[in-house]
Amino acid sequence: MQQTDTVQQFLAYEKCYKITGGYNNCVAAHEPLSYTDKYPLTKNSWVALNGGRMAELTLAPGEKSRKP
């Protein structure tokens, strides 16, 4: 199971690399601290109606949250 997950993550990063032109623009939702206050990029998160995890990325200064 872990190996399958690793392969899927690798393929997702490869696709991101092709789309954005570099790994610096790619974000992993599988970081150990994802969706916690210790990972500011995705700390503002919620569970969607279909059970999927949603996260509002860091907002610009003064921008209003769209979190339901």
Image: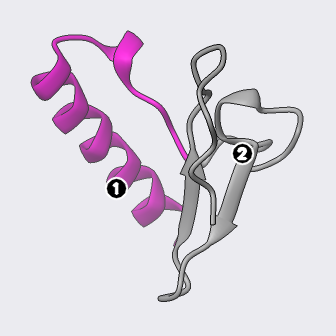
Q: CA distance from mark 1 to mark 2?
A: 18 Å
Q: Which residue sits at x=31%, y=35%? A: 13
Magenta residue span: 1-29
**Secondary structure mostly taken by the magenta-highlighted segment of the chain:** helix
Q: What residue do we see at 11% from left, 25% from top? A: 18
Number of numbered labels in the structure image: 2
Mark before the other along the chain sequence, 1 or 2: 1
In the image, which is nearer the foreground, mark 1 or mark 2?
Answer: 2
Assess whether residue 9 is covered by the magenta stretch: yes
Q: Secondary structure at mark 1?
A: helix
> Label 1 sits on what residue type?
Gln
Looking at the picture, tell me which residue is in the foreground, 55 or 15. 55
**Looking at the image, which residue sits at the far left?**
18
Q: How is the image coloured?
A: one colour
Task: Give the farthest residue toward the bottom.
Answer: 50
Closest to the observer: 60 or 11? 60
Q: Which residue is mark 1?
A: 8
Residue picked out by circle 2:
34
Q: Is residue 21 above or below residue 2?
A: above
Give x and y (percent) for residue 52: 52, 76
Give the answer, above or below, for where 5 lies relative to 55.
below
Q: Residues within 10 Å of mark 1 (few under 14, many from 20)?
A: few
Per the image, label 2 sits on a secondary structure element best described as: loop
Q: Nearer the viewer, residue 61 or 50?
A: 61
Q: Which residue is at a point 41% across and 65% down the rendered structure image?
A: 4
